[in-house]
Amino acid sequence: MATRWGICSAGKISHDFCVALRTLTPDNHQIAAVAARDLQHAEEFAKKHNISRAYGSYDELARDPDIDVVYIGTIHPYHLSTGKLFMTSKKNVLIEKPLAMNSREVQGLIAGAQDNNVFLMEAIWTRFFPLSLEVRRLLGLGEVGDVQMVRADLGAPLTHIPRLAEKKLGGGALLDLGIYCLQFVLMVFNGEKPESIQATGHCIDTGVDGTAVLVLKFSGNRLAICTCSITMMLTCDAVITGTKGTIKVPHHMWCPTTLEVNGKEMQFPLPEAGMPLNFTNSTGLRYEAEEVRNCLLKGLKESPGMPWAHSILLAEVIDEARRQMGVTYDQDNIC
């Protein structure tokens, strides 16, 4: 039986997610309904993606009895409220990254999943790319020896985009781009909590972080350096340095298809899109959708590939980096 998806928010990322779902067999995945805050917008989206039901409110989608899981593609500040809305209605949820605005909200969502006995996963799509699975396999085999250093960079001039630059929209380099660098580091170190975090950078006029540089120290003097920016173009790559060699993601580290292991290149091509996409390599969103379906079939409430503990740690690291840089959001002041 197909997993029946509800789509919350009819924006750009939701469009790409639906395109990615169409690359999977309809016997396994069905887009059953879409909801937006404006009915006309939802109906236009439904027509474009051949979705049978369109709603002009998220509440209507929450009440739909024929939905197995809801993909939440709202902007960051609404992840907590929409996540709780659907979980209270006994809907499983896949919430776009970041899972929430801070670690307190992340823990609130996890508590909601536990209270309502539903599945919850942060949509860190990179975790489920075939390339990322290969990286974890190679590390497990000791292909490059003991990991000593991880470096990950991601940045581009994006301050002209309101949701990336405006504080009230949850903007900032760390929440939108740095999260990819940090999740890569935490994946390599298997969710280990760093012994220390040092963060520096600068903020733009709106009060959000424009560029951030983080140095994380792990046990055994292992280090990680993450750089993210919405004000400048960075290399957008990642390197794992071990005692016996290196693993490199030479470009598109947030949606990777090329890997270099000790100088040998490996390719992990993605399926072709059936219609134009908004973001690079977005058909790769199919892999997180497959992970959700597999977890639901097994009766799991969290993903082994992106467990709740990793989402909490990821949020805690970003919280600490923001604290050191003096970046706060209204959500930080809610007790």
Image (cartoon, rainbow, N blue to C red):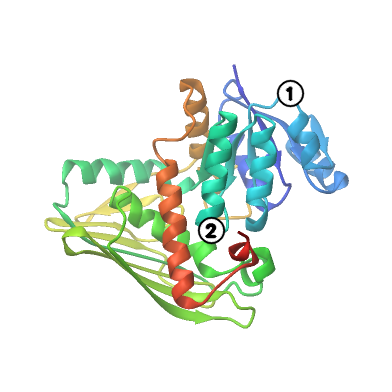
Q: Check the image and report above or below for 146 versus 55.
A: below
Q: Check the image and report above or below for 273 versus 238.
A: above
Q: Which mark is residue 65?
A: 1
Q: Position of residue 197 (x, y in %)?
A: 34, 68
Q: Mark 1: few, some, or many residues within 10 Å (few <14, many ≥20)?
A: few
Query: What amino acid is labelled 1 in the image?
Result: Pro
Q: Residue at x 48, y 38 (%)?
A: 287
Q: Position of residue 333 (x, y in %)?
A: 61, 65
Left of 130 or right of it: where is 245?
Answer: left
Left of 36 or right of it: where is 24?
Answer: left
Residue 194 appears in view: yes
Q: Check the image and report above or below for 15 versus 291.
A: below
Q: Residue at x 60, y 37 (%)?
A: 93
In the depicted view, which residue is nearer to us: 104 or 86? 104
In the depicted view, which residue is nearer to us: 239 or 180? 180
Name the residue carrying label 2: 102
Q: Check the image and report above or below for 182 versus 172.
A: above
Residue 252 appears in view: no
